[in-house]
Image (cartoon, grey):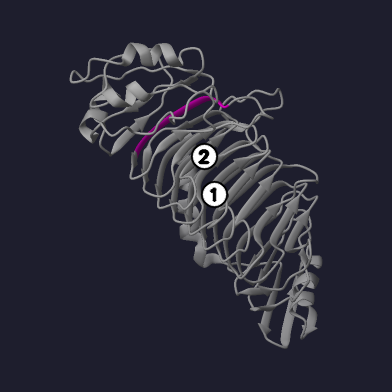
Amino acid sequence: MTRISLLANLLAFAATACAQCGAGNPGATVDGSSGNYVATANGGQVYAGSDYRLAIQTAIDSVSAGQRVSVLASGGIGASSIDIPSGKTFEVCGTLDVGFNNARGAIRSLGTSDVSIPYLTMTGNPYFGMQFYGTSNLHLGEIVLNLSGGIGIRFDRDAASNSDVSMDSIRVTGAGSHAVETFNINGLTIGEVIATDCGESGLLIQTSTDVQVGYVEGNNVGAGTGYATLRFANNNGQLPDGSYDTNVYVDRVVSRGGGRGVFCVSQSGGAEIGTVDLADNGNNAILIENCYNLSILGGTVSGGGEVRLSARDEFPNTRDISITLRVDGTTVRESPQSLAPESCFKPSRAAAPPFPLELHHGQRRTGPLPHMQTYFDNFKAFPVTDNLKVQDVWDKRFTAGMANFEEGIASHWSWGRIVLAGDAAASSRNAHT
């Protein structure tokens, strides 16, 4: 509860503070208009001329740690970068237009501590809109990136790690790749990420621990790809001792169209998602592949791609998965199918949709399912996920098939409880039996 309250307070503070860019007494300002920019610092003019980028960088370099630079003017920096050193606050109250600078960010802070960027509106086609590595105590506030390509925010993979990174509200439109891509962060707090019409992931978190995210939204994100509105990859959530105790928390994920909704892959896990609202995803609504200790506590999947559990041979099996969902207009499946041609979760003709689905950990307790005779006649268990147990399933209308169901899965599966019901009312009863 404390975690959720902190995230809510973070967003509330950001929303009320959005009119404060440039307020008070910044240590330096950049003002003017195209072709005529003036930078002042600590009461004196430090630049006057036509170069917007140079005016900004001169202002930054003219203040000390603990001071703020407010860019009041709008302009373009072309295929160049602005570097933010340790201890400084940098905000853009106008609009910063950027160009393509191969393998470099338009805004960069590399190997720094105590940097804050409370406000930024960016347009253009960067390689990276914002680039970071080796940071500690980095704060990003109200960031709006209206792009025509590139990656919005990038924390580099093959570079020094980061600690204690916070982001209030990140809104990215039109990125050719990911809206926000992170690597190597210990201690990441995000209020919200809203991605629209982006080429790959909305929020991609990799090789990071101690993560708290309030809200992730993707609208037409990753269309035609295997990327997702929310993606965990590359050992994300794995603690230094190799374990996957829960340390990644996401309150809510909303996804419409695009590629996948939620994707956990490549030995990631240790994650809890409070609720999901996924509709009309072009690829899997949810794909869980070689993922360990992942919980989705509630939500809905409507149409679009299936909910799928999977595993690749090069990594240990998927395990310790706990999901509670209502799934309408699509299937729930385990694949690859190792032992039988029938998919594990494919509803039979005897069970009409919708099929609320619940997968939970807890004490084993079995009972019948409604309208599922043919389903269980055709059910086979596949050893893609270890140690499955079925529990809290109860409906007096169904009296056959459960014993064989349990016997078939006991040696292969371990990820909690499955509830498939023929109607929402039955699902509600099952969930509270």
Percent x, y for residue 369?
27, 22
| Dot in front, 2 or 1 | 2
Q: Residue furthest front?
A: 341
Q: Report which quarter residue 268 is drawn in.
A: top right
Q: Quadrant of the C terminus?
A: top left
Q: Which secondary structure class fits the magenta region best?
A: strand
Choose the circle earlier in sequence order: 2 or 1. 1
Which disc number belongs to residue 377? none
Residue 420 sits above or below residue 58 on the image? above
SS for dot 1: strand
- Contact flag, marks 2 and 1 (Cβ < 8 Å): yes
Residue stretch in magenta: 318-326
Residue nearer the viewer, 131 or 263: 263
Residue 125 horizontal/vertical position (percent): 67, 71
Q: Residue at x 54, y 46 (%)?
A: 230
Residue that label 2 marks: 287
Q: Secondary structure at mark 2?
A: strand
| Identity, as a three-letter code, of the amino acid under mark 1 | Ala
Residue situated in front as seen by the camera: 354 or 213: 354
Residue drawn at x 49%, y 55% is: 218
Give the quadrant of residue 60.
Answer: bottom right
Q: Residue at x 20, y 32 (%)?
A: 425
- Image quarter hosting the N terminus: top left
**Residue lying furthest left in this view?**
397
Nearer to me, 13 or 327: 327
Q: Which mark is residue 228?
A: 1
Residue 249 position within the rendered picture, expressed as x and y whole percent measured from the top left: 52, 36
Instruction: Answer whether residue 365 is visible to the viewer in this image.
Output: no
